[in-house]
Structures are given as structure tokens and as C-alpha cells.
Image (tube, rainbow, N blue to C red):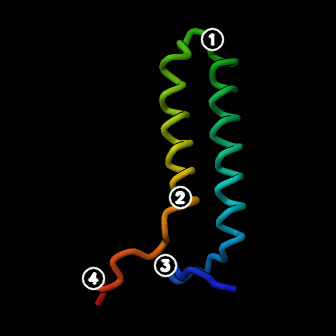
Amino acid sequence: MKNITYYNIHIYYMNKYLMILLAFLLINGLGSLTTYLVPSIPKNKVLPIVLWLNMILFLALFLPSKVASFLTI
């Protein structure tokens, strides 16, 4: 099984997918909870932030974890 070494912590690929799934649930849950608990905040202020964070998580699924390895010493 391949793993990623990040700041001396080994992150396995399945663990990466699990963390992204949990972050997706947390972000969307907090976004919907925010509009429910604070109804004075307009949804057009919360929705772009939630969508932006969802896009970052979506890109984290498909972009490679190691790029430009020739730049490392």
C-alpha cells in the first residue's frame, strides 16, 4: 500500500479519502447549521464559502500529492 510522508506523518491513501469525506460532511453540516442557527445571515454569503471549500476538497481527491519532485533537495 502506498503512503505519503507529510511532516514525518505517514498518511495512507484510504485514510486520505476518509479525511476528505469527513471534512466534506463537516463543512456542509456546519454550513447548513450556520444558516439554521443564525437566520439573519443571508444564504448568498454562506453558500460561496461552502462551495469554495467543497471545490478544494474535490480537487484534493484527484490532484497528485507529489508534484515537482525535482525541486526538492
Q: Distance between the residues labelled 3 and 2?
A: 18 Å
- Position in image of residue 13 (x %, y %): 66, 73
Q: Give the residue pinned by disc 1.
A: 39
Q: Tag 3: residue type?
A: Tyr
Question: Can you tell which of label 3 and label 2 is closer to the viewer?
Answer: 2
Q: In which quarter of the image is residue 36?
A: top right
**Which residue appears at 48% of the width and 28% of the height?**
48
**Residue 62 appears left or right of 21:** left
Q: Give the residue pinned by disc 2.
A: 60
Q: How crowded is mark 3: few (under 14 residues within 10 Å), some or many (20 or more)?
A: few
Q: How crowded is mark 2: few (under 14 residues within 10 Å), some or many (20 or more)?
A: some
Q: In which quarter of the image is the N terminus?
A: bottom right
Q: Distance between the residues labelled 3 and 4?
A: 17 Å
- Position in image of residue 12 (x %, y %): 66, 77
Q: Distance between the residues labelled 4 and 1?
A: 49 Å
Q: Give the residue pinned by disc 4.
A: 71
| Labels 3 and 1: the sequence-earlier one | 3
**Which residue appears at 44% of the width and 76% of the height?**
66
Q: Give the residue pinned by disc 3.
A: 7
The reply to whether discs 3 and 2 touch (Cβ–Cβ < 8 Å) is no
The reply to whether discs 3 and 1 touch (Cβ–Cβ < 8 Å) is no
Q: Distance between the residues labelled 3 and 1?
A: 41 Å
Q: Tag 1: residue type?
A: Pro
Q: Tag 4: residue type?
A: Leu
- Position in image of residue 56 (x %, y %): 50, 49
Numbered circle sitting on residue 30: none
33 lies above or below 16: above
Task: Report the residue that reaches farthest toward the front.
Answer: 62
**Residue 68 appears left or right of 42:** left
| Labels 4 and 2: the sequence-earlier one | 2
Q: Please tell me whether mark 4 sits on a helix, a strand or a loop.
A: helix
